[in-house]
């Protein structure tokens, strides 16, 4: 073979290799699924997800029927009312605030039903539960829905939305057929419920308290600890770079920007993201919705939690645990609360219980005082100024069993919100050892 023939053969091989490499580059497709999965956190499921109307729901329903006030806090009763309203079409929403004097006369009047929420709710949030027909819905908030059950002779049913804080009211209309069905199916059975009475606080808020003593169960539960590794995977952007340390019952998970503390001594978990842009900007319906979505993101509803309140100045949203019979649960260090503080776009702080109530062990019946007895007891407290009393409700005090910390006990009692802090009114008439609930 001559020298020229060898050069020609080598050149042919090189051209062929170049073509093959070019074709490989053009047609190469990386395994994107594998690469993406390497940086994606697996979906975490601590417990369950909840829809909006199961989390943002009333605290109490009151019926002004045949000269008396009847009411309920029972979970099933509340769900029945909201499910009924879910069928209605609300239309012609108008501001009624310039007629507040007239409106105040309607509150507590015969033929009215009151649906009471624990704090103001933006209507743009709750329109995901109720069906509003108006194309341009006014922006307002409410903590009470009032239904005028007496529709005889009227072509339209009347429903009012009231904000006790803002002293504002809105009126809207519904088909009277819906009101008539509500009247027949629910309102006319009101006298089967416990009887209540009205009490107006110094801040103008009207609360409804039971006329009779209340029979409540004391509960004892075995708890199960939440999986901190699952929470780590849910909360940190890239859990592969999270460092873990442990000392004296406290686990700490940290990366370059965030920290999660699991304190098994007090059964609490705290996640802090200090670099989030936290400014004092007024909260909107977005804050509540984002908070619900955030917990749903890791199926973090480990009990019957409901929206309890929001602090616009701190962009904070709190959800409170409720008992299965519909009473709020309180604890001085937050063991019955899921609380979030938001930056502009990211979570700034997230605190929650580190356990879930799992197995109910014992129940015992207890009788707590009537509403009138509680008001008398509050009146005897020299350190309680009526102008700072915000709310009053029966509920449960959550504590760990002194002999077995893995057991949780729910004790019935009376609780009052004083200057925006919840306290227990103990049976000896003091607000002492169990006071200062937040």
Image (cartoon, rainbow, N blue to C red):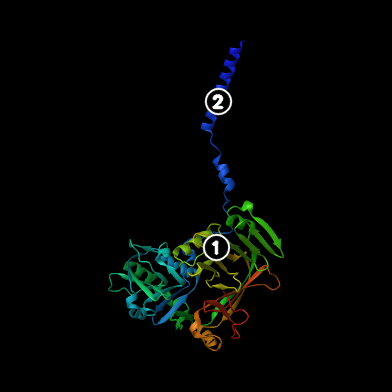
Which quarter shows the C terminus?
A: bottom right
Q: Which residue is most to the front?
A: 3
Circle number at residue 18 = 2
- Above or below, comparing residue 5 to residue 282 in the picture: above
- Above or below, comparing residue 42 to residue 263 in the picture: above
Residue 197: x, y in percent?
Answer: 45, 82
Viewer-closest of 361 and 37: 37
Q: Is mark 2 on a helix, strand or loop?
A: helix
Q: Do the residues labelled 1 and 2 touch (CB within 8 Å)?
A: no
Which quarter shows the N terminus?
A: top right
The residue mark sitting in front, 1 or 2, is 2
Residue 147 figure quarter: bottom left
Residue 372: x, y in percent?
Answer: 50, 85
Q: Left of 389 or right of it: where is 407?
A: right
Q: Left of 195 or right of it: where is 269?
A: right
Residue placed under numbered mark 1 in the picture: 348
Residue 105: x, y in percent?
Answer: 35, 81
């Amino acid at each position: 073979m001559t020298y020229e023939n060898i050069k020609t053969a080598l050149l042919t091989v090189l051209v062929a290799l170049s073509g093959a490499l070019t074709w490989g580059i053009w047609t190469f497709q990386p395994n994107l699924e594998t690469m993406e999965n390497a940086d994606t956190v697996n979906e975490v499921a601590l417990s369950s997800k909840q829809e909006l109307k199961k989390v943002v729901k009333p605290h109490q329903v009151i019926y002004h029927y045949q000269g008396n006030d009847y009411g309920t806090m029972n979970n099933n009763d509340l769900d029945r009312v909201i499910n009924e309203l879910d069928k209605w079409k609300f239309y012609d929403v108008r501001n009624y605030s310039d007629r507040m004097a007239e409106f105040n006369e309607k509150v507590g009047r015969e033929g009215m039903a009151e649906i009471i929420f624990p704090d103001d709710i933006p209507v743009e949030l709750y329109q995901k539960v109720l069906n509003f027909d108006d194309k341009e819905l006014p922006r307002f908030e409410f903590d009470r829905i009032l239904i005028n059950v007496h529709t005889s002779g009227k072509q339209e049913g009347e429903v009012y939305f009231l904000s006790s804080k803002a002293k504002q009211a809105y009126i809207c209309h519904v088909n009277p057929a819906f009101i008539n069905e509500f009247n027949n199916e629910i309102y006319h059975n009101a006298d089967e419920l416990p009887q209540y009475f009205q009490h107006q606080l110094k801040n103008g808020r009207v609360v409804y308290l039971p006329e009779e003593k209340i029979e409540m169960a004391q509960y004892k539960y075995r708890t199960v600890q939440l999986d901190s590794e699952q929470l780590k995977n849910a909360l940190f952007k890239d859990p592969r770079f999270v460092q873990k340390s442990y000392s004296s019952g406290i686990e700490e998970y940290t990366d370059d920007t965030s920290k999660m503390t699991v304190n098994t001594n007090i059964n609490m978990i705290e996640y802090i993201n200090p670099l989030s842009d936290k400014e004092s900007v007024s909260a909107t319906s977005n804050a509540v919705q984002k908070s619900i979505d955030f917990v749903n993101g890791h199926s973090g509803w480990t009990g019957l939690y409901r929206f309890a309140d929001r602090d616009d100045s701190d962009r904070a949203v709190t959800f409170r645990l409720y008992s299965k019979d519909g009473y709020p649960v309180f604890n001085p260090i937050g063991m019955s609360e899921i609380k979030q503080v938001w930056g502009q776009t990211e979570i700034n702080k997230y605190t929650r219980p580190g356990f879930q109530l799992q197995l109910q062990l014992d129940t015992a019946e207890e009788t707590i005082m009537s509403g009138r007895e509680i008001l008398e007891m509050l009146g005897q407290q020299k350190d309680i100024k009526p102008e700072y009393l915000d709310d009053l409700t029966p509920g449960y005090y959550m504590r760990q069993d002194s002999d077995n910390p893995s057991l949780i006990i729910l004790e019935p009692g009376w609780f009052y919100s004083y200057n925006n802090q919840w306290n227990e009114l103990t049976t000896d008439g003091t607000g002492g050892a169990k006071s200062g609930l937040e």
